[in-house]
Amino acid sequence: MRVLGLDLGTKRIGIAVSDRSGTIATPFLVLQRSKTKTQDHAEILRLILEEEAVAIVVGMPYTLRGEMGATAKSAEAECTQLAKVVGVPVYIHDERFTTVTADRSLMEARMKADARRRVVDKVAAAVMLQSWLDAQPKPEKP
C-alpha cells in the first residue's frame, strides 16, 4: 500500500512517499506551485499513477491550539478539490511542528540554510506521513 504525503504550501508542495508495505515514509520531491491548483492537482494525479499510490495524506496545518485557522480552512478546501481529481482516498493528518522537526534534523545534519530551504518541504511531508503511517492499525500476525 504505497501512500503519498503532501505538505501543501502557498509556493511549494512537499511530497513524501511510503514504501510498498506502508511502513516507512521517505522524502520524495518538492513541487513548485504553478499558476493554478488545477495544474498542481494534475501533477499530483500523475505522481499517484506513476508511484501506484492507493491514498494521499495531506498535512493539516491546525493552529497550536488544534483549531482550524485560515490556513487549515484553505488546506481543507484544497483537499476537497483534490479528492475530486485523484481517484484515491484523501486523508488529513495533523502537521503541526513537522516543518520545525524537519528543519532541526537538517540543521543537525549540518546542511546549509539555502540547501535546507530546497528540501525542507519534502522532509516535513515525510515527517507527517510517517506519523500517519505509525498511527494506522497493523494487521494481526497469525
Image (cartoon, rainbow, N blue to C red):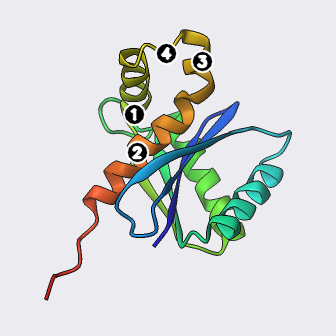
| Quadrant in which the N terminus appears | bottom left
Q: Earlier in the sequence, mark 1 or mark 3?
A: 1
- Image marks 1 and 3: residues in contact by CB distance under 8 Å: no
**Residue type of the residue flagged with mark 3:** Ala
Element type at marker 3? helix
Q: Which residue is mark 4?
A: 111
For label 3, the crowd category at 10 Å Cα-Cα, with few meaning under 14, some 14 to 19 and many 20 or more, is few
Element type at marker 4? loop
Closer to the eye: label 1 or 3:
3
- The residue under the point 55% across, 33% down is 121
Q: Earlier in the sequence, mark 4 or mark 1?
A: 1
Element type at marker 2? helix
Element type at marker 1? helix
Q: Is residue 132 left or right of residue 4?
A: left
- Image marks 2 and 3: residues in contact by CB distance under 8 Å: no
Closer to the eye: label 2 or 3:
3
Q: Is residue 126 left or right of residue 34?
A: left
**Residue type of the residue flagged with mark 4:** Met
- Image marks 2 and 1: residues in contact by CB distance under 8 Å: yes
Give residue 128's mark: 2
- Image marks 4 and 3: residues in contact by CB distance under 8 Å: yes
Give residue 98's mark: 1
